[in-house]
Amino acid sequence: MIRPLLIIRPEPGNANTAARAKAFELDTRAIPLFKISPIAWEPPDPKPYVGILLTSASALRSAGPQLARYTHMPAFAVGGVTARLAREAGFVSVVEGDSDVTRLVGKIATLGLHRLLHFCGNDIRAFDPYGVVIDHCVVYSADTIEPPPAFASAIAEGPVVLVHSPRAAARLAELVEPEARARIALVAISANAAEAAGASWEEVAIAAEPRDEALLEAAAHLCR
């Protein structure tokens, strides 16, 4: 019997991960615990910046037409989906990272770029800037939502849960009582996410790389 997989990230990422899970023949439950909402933002003057940092596809989906003020600048995107959306948004020069923001910023530092504008959400994850000045421009919010009844049902099945961020891990820990955690395994996107989930889970695995495919590969081993 295949153990259920539970995906709790917000849409449209949730549906995208669920679609990828089909290749692994996993019994998937897609139940977002967050909602992405665009927020009003005031475009900073682009002149001080030598590039744009993009660590989330949600920023590109949420920024709106004002993003066009910056598409003449080089964009540095954390992964393939974000890079694709940056090109679709009109950025003429897009450098694609390997889904690890720390390695991407380290690469930027070696290029001698001194100041970047970072389009992001209200939940800004800390990372080493390697001496690069990075100014944040918040264009969306990721807000918690009340889980539907299906969430309790999924938890009762003793699933493997994908944890895409420290915030998601902390939210999951809020919702799952300690006595129920012994029947639930987690696959975390990073050590920070695993730590944020707290203790008492049946098992906590960390993906080999911070990519959806690596999360699903680890989850496939735990689901069978």
Image (tube, helix red, strand yellow):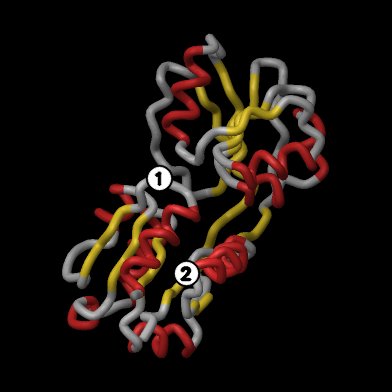
As drawn, 94 above or below 204: above
Q: Which quarter of the image is occupied by the N terminus?
A: bottom left
Please tell me how crowded label 2 is: few (under 14), some (14-19), or many (20+) other residues with Cα within 10 Å.
many
The answer to whether residue 126 is left or right of residue 54 is: left
Q: Secondary structure at mark 2?
A: loop
| Residue, disc 1 | 209
- Taking depth in this image into account, of 139 and 92 the one nearest to the observer is 92
Q: Secondary structure at mark 1?
A: loop
Residue 157 is drawn in which quadrant?
A: bottom left
In the image, 70 versus 158, the foreground residue is 158
| Image quadrant assignment for residue 18 | bottom right
Front-most of residues 128 and 47:
128
Answer above or below: position of 215 versus 105: below
- Taking the spot 64% from the left edge, 43% from the top edge, the residue there is 82
Q: Which mark is residue 8?
A: 2
- Please, what is the three-letter code of the amino acid marked with disc 2? Ile
Q: Position of residue 134 (x, y in %)?
A: 52, 25
Residue located farthest toward the top when viewing the structure as drawn: 112
Q: State whether residue 186 is above or below residue 176.
A: above
Disc 1 residue crowd, few under 14, some 14–19, many 20+, Cα 10 Å: some
Q: Amino acid at mark 1?
A: Glu
Estimate the spatial distance between the alpha carbons at disc 2 and disc 1, rounded to whole Å. Answer: 19 Å
Side (left or right) of 163 relative to 63: left
The C terminus lies in quadrant: bottom left
